[in-house]
Structures are given as C-alpha cells and as structure tokens.
Amino acid sequence: MAKQLWDSILNLFGLNWVMPRTVREMTACWSGALGNHRLAVIWRMIPHCLTWCLWREPTSEPLKDWR
C-alpha cells in the first residue's frame, strides 16, 4: 500500500522516484527537488503528510473498538 501511495503522488508531479533506504535520507533529499516552483510549499509537505497517513492507518483500526 505504501509504495502505491508514494507512486501515485509522485506521478501527479510527473516524477519517477527510487525510494531511499531510510526516512532520514528521504527527507534530506526531498526538500530541494522543486526549488522555488509555485508548488514548492506543497511539495515540502508531502513526505510529512504521507508518513502521517501511513503511520496512522494501522494504529487507527484497534482504536475504533476502544472508542
């Protein structure tokens, strides 16, 4: 699921990506990819938003019964 989600977002920008090994490496190489493009702010938010969504999904299922 994670790979398909990343690929979908990157395809929206017309990019192909080889995912780095670690989250730290990914965030280090991600920030400057669009430079001063008008979508640069959105671009910089993507790793944070996708990481949050991917982390939240498996943790939200057990909490549904708890509420």
Image (tube, rainbow, N blue to C red):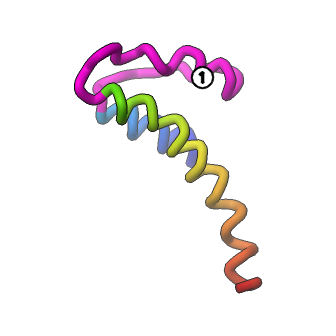
Instruction: Name above or below for residue 44 compared with residue 34.
Output: below
**Disc 1 residue type (three-letter):** Met
Q: Residue at point 67% right, 28% down?
A: 23
In the rendered structure, does residue 22 fall within the stretch colored magenta?
yes
Q: Quadrant of residue 8?
A: top left
State the residue position of label 1.
26
Report the predominant secondary structure element of the magenta stretch. loop
Q: Residue 4 vs residue 13: left or right? A: right
In the rendered structure, does residue 14 fall within the stretch colored magenta?
yes
Q: Residue at point 68% right, 23% down?
A: 24
Q: Quadrant of residue 26?
A: top right
- The quarter of the rendered structure image containing the C terminus is bottom right
Which segment is the magenta one? 13-39
Instruction: Name above or below for residue 63 compared with residue 18.
Output: below
Q: Residue 40 vs residue 28: left or right? A: left
Residue 61, how many percent across, how many down?
68, 71
Residue 21, how many percent across, how many down?
69, 21
Q: Residue at point 39% right, 38% down?
A: 9
As rendered, which of 48 and 11 lies closer to the eye?
Answer: 48
Residue 49, how many percent across, how many down?
51, 45
Q: Residue at point 72% right, 75% down?
A: 63
User: Few, some or many C-alpha atoms within 10 Å of disc 1 (few <14, some 14-19, many ≥20)?
Assistant: some
Q: Secondary structure at mark 1?
A: helix
Q: Quadrant of residue 12?
A: top left
